[in-house]
Structure formats: C-alpha cells, structure tokens
Image (cartoon, rainbow, N blue to C red):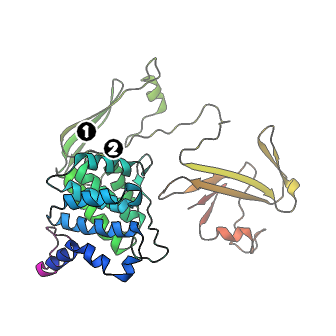
Amino acid sequence: MASKYDFLEVDSETLKNALGFCADIEVHLSGDDETNMCVNETKSALLAYALYVQALNNKDVGKQASALLQKASMSQLSLEACGWILTALGLSRNKNNNEVKGLIDHVKSKVVETGAYAHFTTSYHDDGMSVMLHSNSRTDAILLEALLVNEASSPLCVKLAKGLQSQRRAGKWNSTQENCFVLSALNRFFVLYENEEPNFTADVWMGGKWIMSHTCLGRSIETKQVKVPMVALLSETSSEGMTKLVLQKRGEGRLYFRIGLEYTPRFLQQRAVSYGFSISRTYEGVRSPLHAVYDANTQTWELAAGEKVRVTLSLGTTCVRHHVALVDYLPAGCEPINPVLRGIIGSGEGKFSMLRGMCAFLGGSCEYT
C-alpha cells in the first residue's frame, strides 16, 4: 500500500477506502477463515502494518499501537511488527516514551553489526502457509524507518542505510516489496541526513602534520584518497604508542570518511584469528595419502614433489557479507591446475569440476567469488 509522498500521486478515493479497511482490520481478520488459521505472530504483524499505514497518512493511532504492544508481548512480535509499531508510536502526538525506549532496546538486541553494516534476520512461523511476504532486506528497511522516526541520531541508521545500498543488484533489490520499503526508508534517511547540500572543506592532521584537504561543492560520488607511509605514521606515535588523528570540517553538509590500516606483521608465524570470517585449508594427496602429510609439531605440511594435491578450502562467516573475493595463495613450488582446459593433468569430472564458473586461476593463486 502506498502512502502519500510529494513525488507519488495516489487516487484519493482509493486511499480513503484503503484507510477505512485498515481502520477495521480486526473485523476483517476475525471474519477470514484463512487468517483465523494464522499464528499470533502473523496476526500481530498484520495489525501492526495496518496501524503503520494509517500513521503514515497522518492518523494518530498511538493508543491502538500501545494496546497492541501490551496485548502481544515483544517475544511474540516479529521484527517487522516491532518496526511498524515503533513508527506508529513515533508519529503519534501523545507517544509513550517508555514504550518506545523498551521497543528500541528490544530491536537493538536483535541486530547483527559489522564495522560498516548492520542487518536483521526475520521469519514468520506460519508452517509454510506464506501468509506474510517478508525478507531480510525488507526488515532492515522497516526498522531503519522506525529508528529514523524515533532515534534518528542512532549510529545504526547509517549502518542500516549502507547495508541496504550494498544489497542492490543492477540498481534494484530482489522484489517489488523490497524496492518499495527500501526506497521509502532511504527517502526518509535522505531527508534527515542529507537535507543540506554539501559546501564544505575537510582537513586531516596526523599528530602535528597536515595530511590533506578537500573541498566538496554540491552532491557528488567523487572520493578523495591519501595514503600515509607506515614510517610517517610511526614517527608521529607518542611514547604511549598512540597516534593522534584530527579531522576538521568547515561548512555545511555531511562528511563521509573511512580510515583504514594496511600493515605487514614483523613475525610471519601468526596465530589464527577471526574477525567475522574463518578460513581453514587442508591438503590431500590424490594418488596417495603420503603425498600430503601434516606435521603437528612444526604445524607445517610436507608435499611430495611432482604429485597432484587436492586443496580443500573452507570459508565461514557469522553474518551477511557483500562483494567478497577470497584469494588463496598456493604453497611455494605448487601451481594450480585448471580443470576446464582439456589436456591438463587432472581435468575431467570430479571434485575439481565443482569450481567451474566461480573460480579464477591466477599465477600462483586461486580467486573465489
């Protein structure tokens, strides 16, 4: 259902009928045999959505939203329902701040965050009846809009917006449902966060040294990048091992920036670490197990010269990631075998064929996407 926006014209009679249906949603649900079979979670989501639509069209439904929240405990509400109730409460003239805070805290306890993105995962336990359309991207958009209405300064807003933008494929999302809710949320995000056209100058200092300056005039996707050598970074490090980095913005508009660090460890024998990804690899002799032997004492592999070795690479992640490429460098003395090419030793159908179409063979390494 479309709400009224400046850029979208909705027939007044159609909108009037739709709002009347939403106002009497409980009557319609109680008289529908199919929805009577729905679980409480689905019914609560339908009621919350009806309140959300009315709230977007300047109807004060704060009391009804509070009543629904009290009737259905937070554990029985889907994340989408929580978002719709939050928006209805936030747009009410007499909202209950304690209810809003409690619901926001509940939503934040369900979020999965990375350094740049945030996302939610949802489902409806309707036993395959498919009563409710839903997706993770739609849920992210609904909760982004709810946070923008009630807590626009939350750092989650920027992370959710960036996460939604990264989920696009060919400029759009996976369905009409996702497109509608995401565009609605990003429109509200743009109005709140990008209401001032950029007209500023940004400067960066490291320690006591000036690093860069850049002037932004108007909206643009242009980026300015500067690389600082590690020697310069270490020269500005204090006795406590800290380096002071100062960013200054003079003028109007929003400044987006990213700070990254690339380094080479002094000691190459490093312990395994996990920052959201886990990678493991094993080697297996194709003709004989003795052609690839692991020495637990030295934590090294011994590979037989001139023999074929199968590499099993496993990549795990704890949350949603986008645009990931994994480059697997082979041990010294090894070279990759491309099973796609005829006449290559090891070509033919087998485990190698699973890599076709998703593996690029580079000099001394394989890249998986």
Magenta residues span: 1-14
User: What residue do we see at 77% from left, 68% from top?
Assistant: 346
Question: Residue 93: which quarter of the image?
Answer: bottom left
Residue named by callout 2: 257
- What kind of residue is marked 1? Ala
Residue plotted at (29% across, 65% down): 48
Q: How many residues crowd mark 1 within 10 Å: few (<14), some (14–19), many (20+)? A: some
Residue 143 is left or right of residue 3, and the answer is right
**Vertical comparison of 203 with 96: above or below:** above
User: Does residue 339 show up?
Assistant: no
Contact (CB < 8 A) between labels 2 and 1?
Answer: yes
Q: Position of residue 74 (x, y in %)?
A: 37, 55
Q: Which residue position holds label 1?
A: 202
Quadrant of the snapshot with the C terminus: bottom right
Of residue 304 and residue 350, the one placed in the foreground of this image is 350
Look at discs 2 and 1 and give the one toward the viewer: 2
